[in-house]
Image (spheres, rainbow, N blue to C red):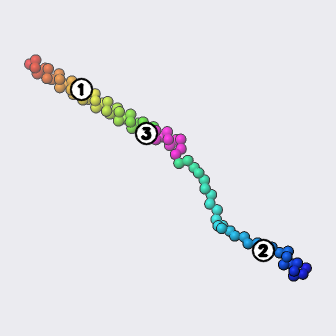
Amino acid sequence: MSTEELEHNFLKLLIYFGDLNHEIITEEPVYTFTRLLSDVGGSLGLCLGVSLLCICELVEVLFDIIQTAVKKVCKRKS
């Protein structure tokens, strides 16, 4: 082969690697169904607990009012 043939038959190839590292991105749900049920149950428990406390306090106040009224009626009769 002559020099001219070699010059015409060769190819100059430049390869550029931007980054040799791989980064794999995966998606995972942050809020799972179990966590949702747990949070809903906790919130419902808190609301029901507060509601039951309010009902108990209301019953106690009504009992105190009735007790005070009965005492006043008894004092008037005496």
| Three-letter code for the amino acid on which mark 1 is drawn | Phe
Residue pointed to by mark 3: 42
| Three-letter code for the amino acid on which mark 2 is drawn | Lys
Q: Nearer the viewer, mark 3 or mark 2?
A: 2
Give the quarter of the image for residue 59.
top left
Rendered image: mark on residue 29: none
Give the quarter of the image for residue 51.
top left
- How crowded pointer 3 is (Cα within 10 Å; few <14, some 14-19, many 20+) is rated as few
Residue 29: horizontal and vertical position, in percent? 55, 47
* Among the two numbered marks 1 and 3 on one chain, the one whose residue lies closer to the N terminus: 3
* Among the two numbered marks 1 and 2 on one chain, the one whose residue lies closer to the N terminus: 2
* Among the two numbered marks 3 and 2 on one chain, the one whose residue lies closer to the N terminus: 2
Q: CA distance from mark 1 to mark 3?
A: 31 Å
| Residues in magenta, as a range | 31-40
| Three-letter code for the amino acid on which mark 3 is drawn | Gly
Residue pointed to by mark 1: 63
- How crowded pointer 1 is (Cα within 10 Å; few <14, some 14-19, many 20+) is rated as few
